[in-house]
Image (cartoon, rainbow, N blue to C red):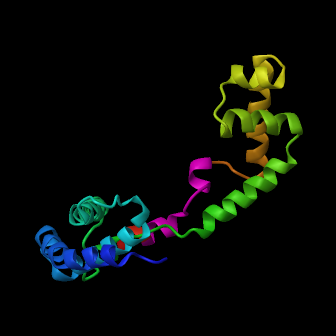
Amino acid sequence: MTIDASVRDSMLKATPNLRAFGISLTNNVDRADDLVQETLVRAIANIHRFQPGTNMQAWLFTILRNLFHSEYRKRRREVEDADGKYAATLSVQPDQMPHLDFADLQTALALLPHEQREALLLVGASGFSYEQAAEICGCAVGTIKSRVNRARNRLADIMHLTDVEEELGPDRLTLSVMAAVA
């Protein structure tokens, strides 16, 4: 892309003032320089939006100000942790078990009769009410309730679950290690 020489000169002439404005906003020379650079990159990319005859410096200052505020909103959500102390306190459950649990569930679902699987997925996974699921399947509400109940019981049998809350998710050893680390 070719930029008109007068537009380029106007941009270069405004650069020291942009830098001063950036420093006043950020109180950091390096961040201000990055902000000015990003401003000029965006200005060049959007030069077709600049209306010749208007104030180039005002247009550039507007871009810089908008970039600063966008960056400020992003940074406000970030946590400063230069020495890594905060990150060291964070712990995440290993992600292998949920993947394995999900694979087991998929296998078990495939073993259910079609009507039970359909009813369970409509009510349990898709969030439809029993009435809505009955309407979708074209059967009575009691039939849907029965299918869902049978499907849940059959899944528990297939997956050898006796206490669902204890058997799904992280095991006791994983939870104790995470508690000790935290």
Residue 171 within the segment the image draws in magenta: yes
Would residue 99 appear left or right of 24 to someone viewing this image?
right
Q: Residue at image x 67%, y 37%?
A: 126
Q: Is residue 164 above or below residue 55?
A: above
Residue 79 spot, x, y in % from top left: 27, 68
- Residue nearer the viewer, 167 or 77: 77
* Magenta stretch: dominant secondary structure: helix
- Residue nearer the viewer, 53 or 150: 53
Residue 122 spot, x, y in % from top left: 72, 34
Residue 32 spot, x, y in % from top left: 21, 76
In the figure, residue 116 lies in which quadrant?
A: top right
Question: Which span is picked out in magenta?
Answer: 164-177
Q: Is residue 10 above or below residue 143?
A: below
Would residue 84 appear left or right of 127 to someone viewing this image?
left
Can residue 81 be seen here? The reply is no
Q: Residue at image x 73%, y 46%?
A: 156
Residue 86 within the segment the image draws in magenta: no
- Residue nearer the viewer, 176 or 93: 93
Q: Quadrant of the C terminus?
A: bottom left
Q: Residue at image x 14%, y 70%?
A: 21
In the figure, residue 85 lies in which quadrant?
A: bottom left
Residue 37 spot, x, y in % from top left: 30, 78
